[in-house]
Amino acid sequence: MGRYDYPSTSFLTVVFFLFCFCPMVFSLLPQNQTETMNNLSKNLPPTIPWSGSDPCAWKGVSCDPANSSVVGISLSGFSLPSSDFLPLVCQIETLEHLDVSKNRLSSIPDGFITECGKIKGLKLLNFSVNKLGGVLPTFHGFDALESLDMSFNVMGGNIGLEIDGLVSLKSLNLTFNGFNGSLPTKLGKPLVLEHLLLSNNTFDGKIPDELLSYENLTWIDLKNNKLSQSIPINIGKLSKLETLILSTNSLTGEIPTSLVNITKLSRFAASENRFTGSIPSGITKYLTSLDLSYNNLSGAIPEDLLSPPQLQVVDLSSNTINGSLPRKVSPKLFRLRLGSNQLSGNIPSDAFVGVHNLTYLELDNNILTGSIPAELGSCRSLALLNLAQNRLSGVLPQQLGNLTNLQGLLLQFNNLNGTIPTQIGQLPRLLTLNLSRNSLSGSIPSEITNLGELNFLYLQGNNLSGSIPISIANLSRLLVLQLGENHLRGVIPNMPLNLLVSLNLSSNLFSGPIPSFYGLNSLEVLDLSNNSFSGHIPDYLISMPSLTRLILSNNPLLSGEIPKFSSNVNVEYFGTGLKNNTEQHNRNSNTESKKNGISLAVSILIAIVAAIFLVGLVTLLVVSASHLYYRVSDEHSQSREDRQHPQVMQSNLLTPNGMHRSNIDFSKAMEAVAETSNVTLKTRFSTYYMAVMPSGSTYYVKKLNWVDKIFQVGSHDNFVKELEVLAKLNNSNVMTPLAYVLSTDTAYILYEYISNGSLFDVLHGSMDLSLDWASRYSIAVGVAQGLSFLHGFASSPILLLDLSSKSIMLKSLKEPLVGDIEHYKVIDPSKSTGNFSAVAGSVGYIPPEYAYTMTVTMAGNVYSFGVILLELLTGKPAVTEGTELVKWVLRNSTNQDYILDFNVSRTSQAVRNQMLAILEIARVCVSTSPESRPKMKSVLRMLLNAR
């Protein structure tokens, strides 16, 4: 027999180590903490991935280096609906960090404040992006707490002593709530607080002098409130301040000169206020970013304003600043916006030499004279050059062809002459070229057709002659081509097949038969008026699937019968020999003839005068809209203390659905709206409440704010009739009313409850980053289908008064519902205010033309839909840190990958390519010109083609 080999001593040692010592490595937590963590796990939904014997290995749990105690818990982004688990957390005496952000918590249990306040080492609490309501709790204890984040909730009321006991507090973030009253001044120990973020609330009154005692403050953000009066004159006492943001308030007075003395101040933003006086000299001595746009500042720009070497961003647009441009510019300047002022004189020829970082230069809508400096061609980083609406003269410098990063060249409404330089064709990234309304002459250079990325080409209103370049079809991405009001003649070549919105060849010298426009399957408007075309209308025009308007007026040699077009196509033929046997069509055409009868010279004069006037009006009204947007929820909503049930005057069911009719209880609905804790969503004109019926079914009860603007004398019946029509709509992407209640002072509408909430909630709220691209694409298509249905409604288009991501509800993460469809029918803005832009929509979604047309249009809805597309593509809200998303996309358009939401675009090249294709669709939708935007049916078709 062979010997039996016993294990060696070293082997036994290893075995002993593995079976005895290793379990201790993974179980070093005290038994009470292990039990607490296990109990906590049992009180959380099963979707939380907490399992295993070692809590320190659980996702979101942090332990000290020795794994002997739990120091951090993060439950961020799990859509937790209940906060019942929170008191259990307070049993962990070693806890330092607690993050429960991005959930659906509606309250903080009293036990949490009492017990967690006793934890000696708790440094950070993050409750941001939840649904917390009520007032701010009083924080007793919490002696070590350094960071408190309660942002993006629905809390309100005044703030007094609730946080004054937080003696170690360094950072307080209460942004995006509904706090009101005066700014809090009891914020713990004065020499401790460093970050104070109170933006996007409704604080009013002045900026209190008491804040100046917090001398260690480095970051103050008070934007988007209702603050008034002047900035404290001795604000320079805050010598450590690095960021000061006061934008979108009602602050008045002058900019304090003491700001000049804050040597660490890097960013100062105070746009959209009512500041007057001149800009203090030396204010940019230490700044990298200055934004004083949309105020009432006057006087000249200080000569030293743009010269400090560290300066990167200056925005003084939309003031009444006069005088000349400074001659010295920082070499690091990245963005300079001085548009919509009263600046005069020349653009200094040497000011921008060596400014190699300059990416955005906007000097539009001033009274600048002289020529465009050739030296601008040295600013090789320029992506946007906007000199429109000035009095610039002379020729276009050839050196502009050196700007190979340029995406927007806007020079319209000037007095430029000479020819279009061939070097313009050397701009490979150019998306928009607008040279309209100048005095340019000569031919259109064929080199312009080298601009392979060009989307918009505006050359109308010049003295251009010769023929259209035969290679124009090479502009394969061109969506709009405006060549009207020139002296062009000759053969009209094949056009780019992607022309989407309009092709304008009007008021030229073209003759002969109407040429072939085969393949323009997306074109909506074709304008051939005021030429010398002859012969018949070719039959192929009938088959252009997207055509909605064919303008042939003032072509006297056209003859024959007008072919039978679709009822969607309006043919204008005044001043021709064409005949139409359809009486109604003749009436339409004769109506249009009055417009076409105006002489060309008068038209141009009117356009120029109107443009100058309207730009000023746009500025005034858009600023007003911005101010009012952040106030509507308090000014036109129920008081938080008003707990009385509304007195019902009339109620009725609208739906034939038997289940809804049996479930809806109007008394329960009115009980729900008496409690602010039931508020689930606020949109521009509505407040949504959650109401649980006796059957257990849940419904939305939507209170219509601005109700005093809805009901005029004797109009209750009209309101009911409109709702009855809307209730009969049958579209899977449109949210229809089920019932209504009229009270003595307002109106309520009942809908099915949508548990997923709004698109805004999912994209920017508690479900942030949960949407993959397939879901986002499906939502985009669904919203487009809903809008196309509403715009094509049989009797008349149903328009959206406030189309935003908050008015899009989600049945599932791929099934959207367009909501708030009744507002356009029941709210009469003309009776509510003299300032329509204070009514029509949310900031970030309002089309620019609304400020002066004062009319809600389909084109305006398309603009708002374009913003929603950008939200889906970028993951950003319509307004971020005071900047509209449309402007942000434009300013960053040189880096498309930066624009796209990286968490989505990185998943595959196919996803990235589809997102880029839809980015182009979004850009067309948010075009500044309403005429350049496609109809919703065309947008839907483009989205489907982008699969």
Image (tube, grey):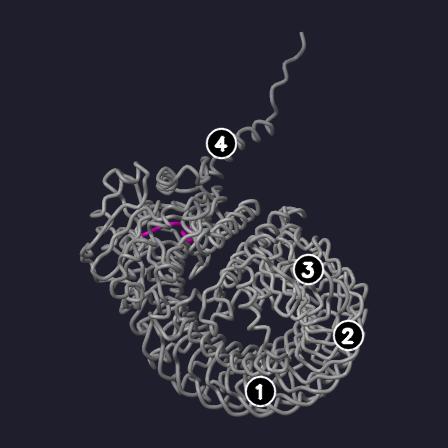
Label 3 environment density (alpha carbons within 10 Å; few <14, some 14–19, many ≥20): some
Q: Secondary structure at mark 4?
A: helix
| Nearer to me, 157 or 87 | 157
- In the picture shown, does residue 686 fall above or below 263? above
Residues in magenta?
A: 100-107
- In the picture shown, does residue 919 fall above or below 511? above
Give the total of numbered labels: 4
Which of disc 3 and disc 2 is earlier in sequence? 2
Instruction: Using the numbered discs, state the Cα–Cα distance from disc 4 to disc 2 in whole angstroms.
Output: 76 Å
Q: Secondary structure at mark 2?
A: helix
Can you give x and y, in whole percent of width and height, for residue 159 in the image? 29, 68
Q: Is residue 747 magenta?
A: no
Which of disc 1 and disc 4 is earlier in sequence? 4
Among the 4 quarters of the image, the one containing residue 480: bottom right
Q: Is residue 265 visible?
A: no
Q: Is residue 173 left or right of residue 353?
A: left
Q: What residue is shown with label 3?
A: 560
Q: Residue at 63% of width from left, 51% of height from top?
A: 545
Q: Is residue 448 visible?
A: yes
| Nearer to me, 570 or 578 | 578
Label 4 environment density (alpha carbons within 10 Å; few <14, some 14–19, many ≥20): few
Q: Comparing marks 4 and 3, which lies closer to the viewer?
A: 3
Q: Which circle marks residue 20 in the picture?
A: 4
Which of disc 1 and disc 2 is earlier in sequence? 1
- Amino acid type at mark 2: Gly
Contact check, label 4 and label 1, Cβ < 8 Å: no
Instruction: Using the numbered discs, state the Cα–Cα distance from disc 4 to disc 3 in whole angstroms.
Output: 101 Å
Give the main secondary structure of the magenta stretch: loop
Which of disc 2 and disc 4 is earlier in sequence? 4
